[in-house]
Image: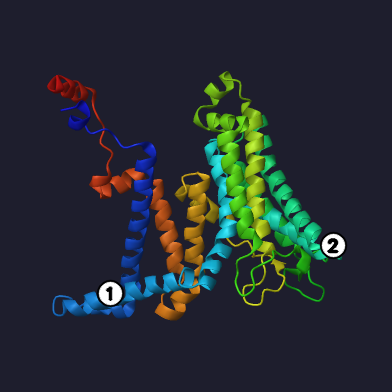
């Protein structure tokens, strides 16, 4: 009998990571289902006399869970229109998630995606409603480019300060988020950005030539394909270029990377600029996406970005900072967002449940040891040296 047969080898790292991620998703939905049942007054009331009529409680719980998850399916994947709703919600999440993931790979925590997305959206919208008469093949690319550059500059400032002063990127990005939010609130109330005659923070309608083209009758628009293209570009950069090698080396061990010839300050600066550009792209996709119901050109508002930058952190964590993983994670969270309305209408479940599930996913993904403790069969078996030696003796 071979040594391999006597000693069970540990799982490859990517296999263990994938298993933990899938288990985290399942656990998040299970806990979400429990909270859903406990927070429904009618269902919870049936549990009060569970021992008298257990069937009523179990049946009501199952009906609630099944109807909610069915509504989620209908709203996100139940039809071609639902699928395109998912892609529309996923597009900015994928782009901004890539911005966080790239920084993670370099050992940097980019919390600044929110501010970077705001700047990207603001500048792209300004180009979109001020320049008139340009053809779409010039106007839309210009708006996208300006938005990406604005996000890149906002992220690059953090990279520069980090590289030159050693200030921590978490503190810097939080500061830049605050500045970006205040700047957005101020500019949206100025005549250069505000719709004439309005007192609320809303811009003029963007020219149709600066709006993402979409497939008629659906929400599938160019922004989704740009996000996928960005993911391919990030993969190529990380896996096929010298800069990508340096970036990952700095993330693993900055001192060793510097010894090997990588310029840590330059990598830090360029990585944060790239991360900011990707987050800016997420903001651009958000603000240039056509209206959900009518397909008409959009308008910039003070709240249009929502929590995109913070959701991007979740996407990057779930995607394990890998481009392909970020795409799938973005699609998952896009599906959750797309299904909010159908959950309320079809199942009477508050749409905040999707936020809870998202938070639980982050909790479980960020704590793989906790998941392995909950599910012992997922624990990676460590092969000790004496076990290998004993197996070799037995095999001889």
Q: Which residue is mark 1?
A: 61
Element marked by disc 1: helix
Q: Nearer the viewer, residue 237 or 145?
A: 237
Q: Quadrant of the N terminus?
A: top left
> Which of the labelled discs sits on residue 387, or is there none?
none
Side (left or right) of 10 relative to 118: left
Q: Position of residue 364 (x, y in %)?
A: 37, 51
Q: Earlier in the sequence, mark 1 or mark 2?
A: 1
Residue at the (65%, 42%) spot, across then down: 274
Residue at the (54%, 26%) spot, across then down: 254
Side (left or right) of 128 relative to 340: right
Residue 24 appears in view: yes
Element marked by disc 2: loop
> Which of the labelled discs sits on residue 134, or is there none?
2
Q: Position of residue 249 (x, y in %)?
A: 53, 29
295 above or below 7?
below
């Amino acid at each position: 009998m071979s040594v391999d047969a006597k000693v069970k080898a540990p799982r490859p790292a990517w296999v263990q990571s994938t298993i933990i991620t899938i288990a985290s998703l399942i656990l998040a939905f299970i806990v979400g289902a429990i909270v859903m049942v406990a927070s429904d007054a009618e269902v919870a009331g049936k549990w009060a006399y569970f021992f008298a009529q257990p069937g009523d409680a179990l049946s009501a719980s199952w009906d609630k869970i099944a109807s909610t998850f069915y509504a989620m399916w209908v709203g996100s994947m139940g039809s071609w229109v639902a699928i395109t709703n998912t892609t529309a919600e996923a597009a900015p999440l994928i782009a901004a998630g890539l911005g966080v993931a790239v920084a993670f790979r370099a050992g940097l925590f980019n919390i600044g995606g929110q501010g970077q997305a705001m700047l990207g959206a603001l500048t792209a919208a300004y180009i979109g409603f001020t320049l008139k008469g340009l053809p779409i093949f010039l106007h839309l690319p210009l708006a996208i480019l300006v938005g990406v550059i604005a996000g890149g500059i906002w992220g690059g400032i953090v990279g520069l300060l980090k590289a030159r002063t050693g200030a921590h990127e978490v503190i810097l990005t939080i500061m830049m988020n605050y500045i970006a939010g205040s700047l957005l609130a101020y500019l949206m109330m100025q005549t250069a950005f505000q719709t004439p005659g309005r007192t609320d923070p809303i811009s003029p309608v963007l020219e149709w030539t600066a709006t993402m083209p979409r497939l008629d009758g659906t929400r599938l628009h160019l922004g989704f394909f740009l996000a996928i293209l960005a993911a391919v570009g990030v993969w190529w950069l990380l896996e096929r270029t010298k800069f990508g090698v340096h970036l990952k080396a700095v993330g693993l061990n900055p001192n060793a990377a510097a010894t090997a010839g990588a310029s840590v300050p330059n990598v830090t600066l360029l990585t944060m600029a790239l991360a900011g550009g990707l987050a800016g792209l997420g903001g651009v996709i958000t603000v240039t996406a056509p209206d959900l119901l009518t397909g008409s050109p959009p308008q910039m508002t003070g709240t249009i970005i929502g929590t995109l930058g913070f959701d991007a952190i979740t996407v990057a964590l779930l995607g394990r900072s890998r481009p392909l993983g970020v795409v799938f994670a973005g699609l998952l969270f896009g599906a959750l967002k797309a299904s909010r309305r159908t959950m309320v209408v079809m199942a009477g479940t508050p749409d905040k449940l999707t936020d809870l599930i998202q938070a639980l996913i982050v909790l479980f993904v960020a704590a793989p040891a906790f998941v392995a403790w909950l599910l012992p069969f997922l624990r990676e078996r460590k092969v000790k040296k004496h076990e290998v030696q004993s197996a070799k003796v037995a095999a001889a």
